[in-house]
Amino acid sequence: MLIFTRYLYIKDEVELSLLVSIFKKNYEQSIFWANELYYSGFEKELQSLLIKYYFDFFFIENSQYLDDIYVMPFYQIVDLLINLSFCLNVFYIKNNCNYNFEHVTEENQFELFNAALKEKSIEFLYKYLMEYCDELCLPFILNTICKHFNKNLEKKRIVSSLQYLKNRYAYFLFSLSFYQETKERKTISTRTIELDWEETIEPWKRLKDHCIYKIDEWNSIKMFGKLEREKDEYTDLDLIYREKWLYYASFSPLWEKRIKLYNGFINHEKKEVNFLEEEEEEDFYNIFDLEPDEQSLLTREKSIGLILIKIDLKIS
């Protein structure tokens, strides 16, 4: 579903812009996109997203920060990830693994799995754990992995990760991390950020003043997944942005709270927000009408600028 955030960016594109900004090691942009999610009401989702990015792109070579990641505020996770080396191996394997399993049977699968651990056959490990291995065998597989790497003490950390990862994926990631030598820990930043809020300016000025960065500024988010804007129902995105913005913003907790405060309700049939009383509707728009239909082309393009190429790849 297409969801507009606090300043009418598209939520899934904000998430990917955050990832790309981290890769680019641009702290200001990374915090901007993280703030956009946080202050749109997606606080818990942002925390989980950053932890997921850590596992997908940083964990294998930086597993020493795992316990810290769970308890850090979002802005310190962003700061940490920017200062770590990232690894695209897992992303590549997810999208390019074509290992042939014709020779694998129920009788020889565990022998082949042990051989793959010894030979560091990453494609076999991924395909076996993610697709072939029976769910009932996974506890045995976990024990096999820990025994092979002499990491029995790591079981607790692996189990803890299952609140964020599927068990199969967790076993794969930890297996890859066990091949790496543990690096020396860097000093973790204790940087804080100032509270970011908007109530001091007129609502119609907020998009112009606060949409500082353009979505997909580096033309990179197309690499990481199919976007909501690509669905047939969103072909006229500019029209949606100008005329149906509040309906799609209502799916952000921040906008939902604002609408309910003035006794508004969602009309899904007409894709609009209605109010019980005309006076309450007027009060709402006096305070919160961002007037996207009156914004300059430059401002509109920052939120819904065209994504150049559409490629469907998996990141989870």
Image: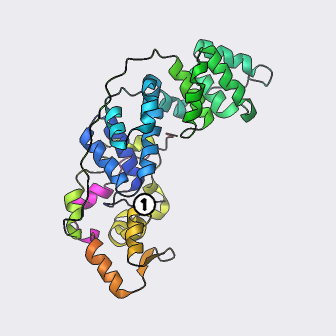
Is residue 249 a member of the stretch shown in magenta? no
How many badges with numbers are in the image?
A: 1
- Image location (x, y in percent) of residue 73: 37, 42
Task: State which region is magenta.
Answer: 291-312
Residue at 46% from the left image edge and 76% from the top image edge: 265
The residue that mark 1 highlights is 3
- Image location (x, y in percent) of residue 67: 46, 31
- Image location (x, y in percent) of residue 29: 27, 44
Residue 126 seen in the figure: yes
Residue 31 sits in quarter: top left
Compared across the picture, whether 99 is left or right of 238 comes to right
> Looking at this view, is 167 or 257 the one in front?
257
Residue 165 sits in quarter: top right
Identify whether 197 is placed above or below 243: above
Compared across the picture, whether 27 is left or right of 116 comes to left
Give amino acid for label 1: Ile
Q: Secondary structure at mark 1?
A: loop
